[in-house]
Amino acid sequence: MAGQRMKKRSGDMEMILQEVLSQIKPAKSATVKEAREFISKVNSLLKKEGVNATAVAGGSVAKGTFLRGDHDVDIFVKFNRDKYKQKDADMSAILGKVLRKGFSKVRRIHGSRDYYRISNGIQYEIVPVLNIRDCSNAENVTDCSPLHVRWVNSFSGMKKEIMLTKAFCKAAGIYGAESYIKGFSGHVVDIITIHYGGFLSLLKASKSWKKKQVIDHYKHHKGKALFNLNRSKTQSPLIVIDPVQPDRNAAAALDEKNFRLFRKRAAEFLKNPSKDFFVPEKMDISELKKEARKRGGKLILIKASPKRGKEDVMGAKLLKTLQFIIQQLSMNDFTVIDHGWHWDRKSSAVFWIITDRKDLPKKAVRTGPPVNVKRHYRKFADSHKNVFVKDSRAYAEVEREFTNAERFIKSLFKNSYIRERAGSIRIDSEDAHHIPEKLRKKSTKKKKKTKKKHKTSNR
């Protein structure tokens, strides 16, 4: 009987995965066709300008793991190594000059080696690299990227499995190594799926992962990766040895929270398989309001536009802005019940915060030093009017500057910490029609009230 149930569940799972694949696989993709035409144009420009370099597809387009709805395409421009090694600045400058001959709105992005972004419905990232056959000849980490593509393409039977893992991670909000995500990069998804022989095998294996789990596909380190690698490279909970660059932990950006979330969702899927695990969580404004009412709170919506820059940096600054607001609310006695944010990388971000519905009392009690520490006690007594002593400790009754969470948040917008990180920011509670329907929810535990004096530190 138990065997029959397991057989049925296995059949259901396979059917679900086939349905998911039919939904995430691009049809005869216009994106892939346009990418080929774009690459052809770049190569024509390079030839016309006499530059010894060749443009090729990179990333998921080159690997055949492109998902329906993806609009980002990586292009590698491979420069002759003998001519351009140790000339990073020259490579970037030459590429920029060539691109501007044939495209408008070419944007230079600063990185370990500067690259370019061109958007025309599809967002192209055009990266200059040295044409190498082995990572030992790399002058920059990006030089190895085409070798990652070559490695994945040597496992042609794994394309669909990688697509499933990618969609699974995207739906959970844990796809991407950017500093504001700290999840599983595309390269890590490729490696771990291939290593375990498929999507389901990966999920099953993750149930027994321990902290500092090492995945070394070719056993380069013979079980001693944690000893062989620099300690700075092994701070992540999962250590994934790069198969083409064995001295590198490809999962170095992964944080503990996303590691745990992957394992949790893997176990949940294996227990109760569903297509829902491949669909990003949706929460519209009306649902957020219901959630707030249910938890005895009120919803505050904030629109924040990023300052122009590299996507990773923009996202990190937006996240730090939200974290600063949450920190300041807690420091000033406001109860934060839950919060989250959404950013589509194209327009303004939306921060949502659920706070206690009630305003704070006008007066608050601040804790002072013990009375027997006379110097500190006198200083506290001199700086406060309504001082009293209880259990040998000084206290003072003070008037709060802010009792309403929304007004307090508005006051924070003038703070230099926020001004340095957000282009513009405003409360948007009554303007719900401007808010995207899809919000990525990042739940937090209910935070305790603290008793601290009003301040808005710049950290």
Image (cartoon, rainbow, N blue to C red):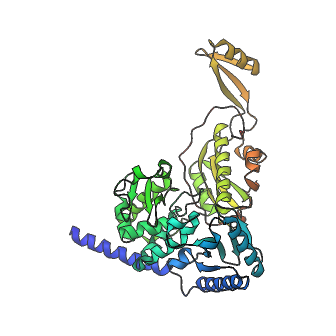
The image quadrant where one finds the C terminus is: top right
Q: Is residue 31 visible?
A: yes
| Side of 377 where 141 appears, left or right | left
Q: In the image, what residue occupies the spot 59% across and 56% down?
A: 179
Q: Is residue 170 visible?
A: no
* Vertical placement of residue 328 versus 64, above or below: above
Spot occupied by residue 230 in the image (x, y as percentages of width and height): 47, 50
| Side of 216 where 57 appears, left or right | right
Quadrant in which residue 100 is drawn: bottom right
Quadrant in which residue 9 is drawn: bottom left
The image quadrant where one finds the N terminus is: bottom left
Spot occupied by residue 64 in the image (x, y as percentages of width and height): 50, 79
Between residues 331 and 53, which one lies in front from this camera angle? 53
Between residues 263 and 269, which one lies in front from this camera angle? 263
* Vertical placement of residue 195 versus 368, above or below: below
Which residue lies most toward the front here? 82
Quadrant in which residue 388 is drawn: top right
Spot occupied by residue 147 in the image (x, y as percentages of width and height): 50, 72
Between residues 38 and 6, which one lies in front from this camera angle? 38
| Side of 439 where 158 appears, left or right | left
